[in-house]
Image (tube, grey):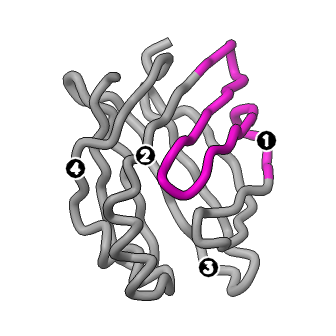
Amino acid sequence: MAFDGSWKIDRNENYEKFMEAMGVGMMKRKLGAHDNLKLTFQQDGNKFLVKEASNFRNIEIEFTLGVNFEYSLADGTELSGAWTMEGNKLVGTFTRKDNGKVLKAYREIVGDELVQTYIYEGVESKRFFKRG
């Protein structure tokens, strides 16, 4: 499918402000802005396997569209939620376990890039990935 393959981080937009809103400390924000994140997607119908490789961790996440699952961010923040598909866009709605606040996430292919958008407490951030 459209997301299948490997994607390497190219650039960020407002990512440090987003991490600050999420409560990530200054040192982790500085490191997080340069995490060299690489995502690898494998889609089989409604099931996805996403491999995340960065300077901080290497993990695999399996999920089925519309089915809640547990997930921990690189800083340890625990979330519960689900991804759905709206048109050609993956839409994630996750609730933080520590404070009950909602994190929205979007993944879509725009031109030759994968654009990942996060919205938390009114702060929007985008991360742009190139195939590779």
Q: Which residue is mark 1?
A: 67
Please rate how many residues cluster around mark 4, counting C-alpha atoms within 10 Å: few if below 14, some from 14 to 19, many from 20: some
Q: Quadrant of residue 93?
A: bottom right
Residue 11 has which mark?
4
Q: CA distance from mark 2 to mark 4?
A: 10 Å
Which mark's residue is nearer the viewer, 3 or 4?
A: 4
Q: CA distance from mark 1 to mark 4?
A: 30 Å
Of the image marks 1 and 2, the number of the one nearer the N terminus: 2
- For numbered disc 2, what is the local secondary structure? loop
Q: CA distance from mark 1 to mark 2?
A: 25 Å
Q: Residue at x 50, y 17 (%)?
A: 4
Q: CA distance from mark 3 to mark 4?
A: 27 Å
Give the residues drawn in magenta, as a range. 42-69
Please say whether residue 66 is one of the residues in the magenta stretch.
yes
Q: Which residue is mark 3?
A: 101
Disc 1 marks a residue whose amino acid type is: Val
The one of 50 and 32 positioned closer to us in this rendering: 32
